[in-house]
Amino acid sequence: MRIRLHFILAALLATSALAQTPAKKAIPVQVKTQALTHSPTPEQLAMLPALRADLEDVRKRIAQAEVEDQKYSGGLIKSMIQSRIAAMRVTDALVEQRIKSIETGARMTIEAPSSKPDPGLAASLDSEASAQRLKIEQARVEADRYSGGLIKAQKESTIATMESTLAMLEQKSLISKYGLVLPSAAAPSLSAVAATQPNVKAVPSQKATRKVLPQDELLKVRLINKRFTEQKYQKYIFFDIEFLAEKLSKPARAIKGRLNLNDLFGDRVLGIGWTVDRPTNPGESVTESGQGFQYNQFMEKHQWVNTTDLSNMTATFTVESILYQDGTREDF
């Protein structure tokens, strides 16, 4: 009882003190308000059914890929499947964001340059994706002829590469169809998304640090053909390549350097020592056939070159030394 009285007395004294304290003048605060919502247009509302159908389709393919992923404990094919899953998750997030934005009227939390839908490009990409699906079905029929072994593994790797290409085509198609935008500065990269998946190593982007040197631009490269062959129990991958001496300063007798085989983003996968030993004049092009490298089935880089379609590869040439026709030499 005494304790309760002490508390009551203390409360009364505090109230009295507050009552005797002169009140401070209220300082008006100006708050700027900004509308966080907007009314969707009739065109956006009409877009919702197609968006929901595409989102459901993407999620079905993610689920199918996750089932396929469980068949492998590691290796190149598993990594490619998980990279495909990561790409489809990015597509899922893009489509879902657009749906939520239309349904709730909420503005995007990240401002990004606007992108107008391009139905013509979307239709072209859809056609390309359909052709790619047909190729995958044909490759699957061919792979199913084998129950195991190296040939089976090579064909499965080819299918995994083709399916990764299909995932990118479908993503580009949806971006063109709905005018979706993925801000490069704010959105996670594909490698960052892949890092959230088990057994996938995120490779840091090299675009910020990669420097294009003058010797990388002296010769432009166009891959014409690629073929796998076996000679005297040795396996090789040969190329037909066109070299364009775009920035050569004077006629060359031979050009020595490295042929860089890159992915679609320009990141080098494999470098090959190469010499263009035909006379080359500035601005002219020369074609070389039947050169390549000895294939090692246990090297993932070699597997990538073998199984990747030529349309999904790019190439550059890093010049190391030039022997000019006038007898002079230039080293880099």
Image: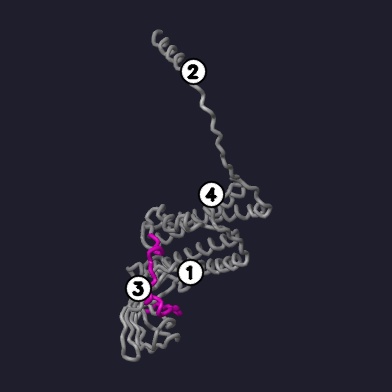
Q: Earlier in the sequence, mark 2 or mark 3?
A: 2
Amino acid found under the numbered disc labelled 1: Ala
In this view, which residue lies farthest toward the right? 42
Vertical position of residue 238 compared to residue 49: above or below? below
Q: Distance between the residues labelled 4 and 1?
A: 43 Å
Q: Earlier in the sequence, mark 1 or mark 2?
A: 2
Residue identifier under label 2? 20
Residue identifier under label 4? 109
Residue 75: percent from the left, percent from the top? 36, 61
Q: What element carries label 2?
A: helix
Residue plotted at (67% across, 55% down): 43
Residue identifier under label 3? 271
Residue 77: percent from the left, percent from the top? 40, 62
| Residue toward you, 164 or 242 | 242
Please rate how many residues cluster around mark 4, counting C-alpha atoms within 10 Å: few if below 14, some from 14 to 19, many from 20.
few
Residue plotted at (44% across, 12% down): 8
Q: Do the residues labelled 1 and 3 touch (CB within 8 Å)?
A: no
Residue plotted at (38% across, 89% down): 279
Residue identifier under label 1? 139
Amino acid found under the numbered disc labelled 2: Gln
| Residue toward you, 269 or 199 | 269
Front position among marks 1 and 3? 3
Give the extent of the magenta segment. Answer: 204-229
Vertical position of residue 113 compared to residue 239: above or below? above
